[in-house]
Image (cartoon, grey):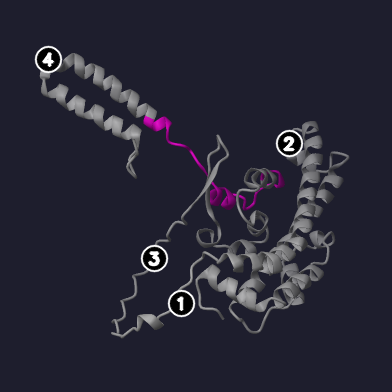
């Protein structure tokens, strides 16, 4: 027997029991025994209904909670969602990077609405939630009557669904070469964070509070502080490269002029970086220049892909 769309079997069973209760009530005293039995049955059906509702993990909510998270929390988050969300490293870098980087991300628009069943690990991507406008809608413009010759009418509308051929070209010519640059930097960041976590886990049991660790009382506290600076430095480099790719993708996609240069962008980001962290950073300019070259060599492809991705007219 097929189920009707929107029908919940457990809920339908509960409604059936409710009908029986109404009948027993109508019988007054004669239906007392039946009423007692049906009430118990209704309770059982309700409990099974509540138990069947899964408590899903939300990728959007957990990603937002990473702002200000510890390296260990970031590592746990990435391990949980690895392979289940596209461009995971890039999204994490934006949220855990600088304040300006966090301000650039729109969770409703840029972050996939993926839900995970914590019991099975299965995921499903739901439609992104519509944003509620906080201003009155603009008045509709009057419709101008036109005569359309259907044989000459061609749809110019776009959607976020990118044609397979264009997606394949994008992956081969742009995104895969970019990932060949970004992935090693992301791995360095992960390794630095794990080294920091490992040392902290060794020192932690020997001290009653975190203050003792960073108060200089432990003989390896200086080593731990150096690892923390190196971890932040590696994360910053990966974040700069990731965010520069996103910036250039938008600039080339919209034909912005003038374009931001690698040297200018890196200089702006380093201005807000702690001096101690900068001493442990690789120079990001070489990596951003490689990103620039990849996109500059595929400008037409970038414009087409951007137009489909963001539902705009090609620049």
Q: Picture quarter containing residue 262? A: bottom right
On the image, the x and y values in percent for residue 39 come to 26, 22
Q: Badge 1: few (under 14), some or many (20 or more) residues near its Cα, within 10 Å?
A: few
Q: Earlier in the sequence, mark 2 or mark 1?
A: 1
Q: Picture quarter containing residue 172? A: bottom right
CA gap between label 4 and label 1 equals: 71 Å
Q: Secondary structure at mark 2?
A: loop
Residue 65 shown in magenta: yes
Q: Which residue is mark 2?
A: 209
Q: Do the residues bearing badges 2 and 3 touch, measured as CB atoms within 8 Å?
A: no
Q: Which residues are magenta?
A: 49-73
On the image, the x and y values in percent for residue 151 come to 38, 81
Residue 199 shown in magenta: no
Q: Which residue is mark 4?
A: 30
Residue 134 image label: 3
Residue 156 image label: 1
Q: Earlier in the sequence, mark 3 or mark 4?
A: 4
Q: Do the residues bearing badges 3 and 4 touch, measured as CB atoms within 8 Å?
A: no
**Front position in the image: 202 or 294:** 294
Q: Secondary structure at mark 4?
A: helix
Q: Earlier in the sequence, mark 4 or mark 1?
A: 4
Q: Earlier in the sequence, mark 2 or mark 4?
A: 4
């Amino acid at each position: 027997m097929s189920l009707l769309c929107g029908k919940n079997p457990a809920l339908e069973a509960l409604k059936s029991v409710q009908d029986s209760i109404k009948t027993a009530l109508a019988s007054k005293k004669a239906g007392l025994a039946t009423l007692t039995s049906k009430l118990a049955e209704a309770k059982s059906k309700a409990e099974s209904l509540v138990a069947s509702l899964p408590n899903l993990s939300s990728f959007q909510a957990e990603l937002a909670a990473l702002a200000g998270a510890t390296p260990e929390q970031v590592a746990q988050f990435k391990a949980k969602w690895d392979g289940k969300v596209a461009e995971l490293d890039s999204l994490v870098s934006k949220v855990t990077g600088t304040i300006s980087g966090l301000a650039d991300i729109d969770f409703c628009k840029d972050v996939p609405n993926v839900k995970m069943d914590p019991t099975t690990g299965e995921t499903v991507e739901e439609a992104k939630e519509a944003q509620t406008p906080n201003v009155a809608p603009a008045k509709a413009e009057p419709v101008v009557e036109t005569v359309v010759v259907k044989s000459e009418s061609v749809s110019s509308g776009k959607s976020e669904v990118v044609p397979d051929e264009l997606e394949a070209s994008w992956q081969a010519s742009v995104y895969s070469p970019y990932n060949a640059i970004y992935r090693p930097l992301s791995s360095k960041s992960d390794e630095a964070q794990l080294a920091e976590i490992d040392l902290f886990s060794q020192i932690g049991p020997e001290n009653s509070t975190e203050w003792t660790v960073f108060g200089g009382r432990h003989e390896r506290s200086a080593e731990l502080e150096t690892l923390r600076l190196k971890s932040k430095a590696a994360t910053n480099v990966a974040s700069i490269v990731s965010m520069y790719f996103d910036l250039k993708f938008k600039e080339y996609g919209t034909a912005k002029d003038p374009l931001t240069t690698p040297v200018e962008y890196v200089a702006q980001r380093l201005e807000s970086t702690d001096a101690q962290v900068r001493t442990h950073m690789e120079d990001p300019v070489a990596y951003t220049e490689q990103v620039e070259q990849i996109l500059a060599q595929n400008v037409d492809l970038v414009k087409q892909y951007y137009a489909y991705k963001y539902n705009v007219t090609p620049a």
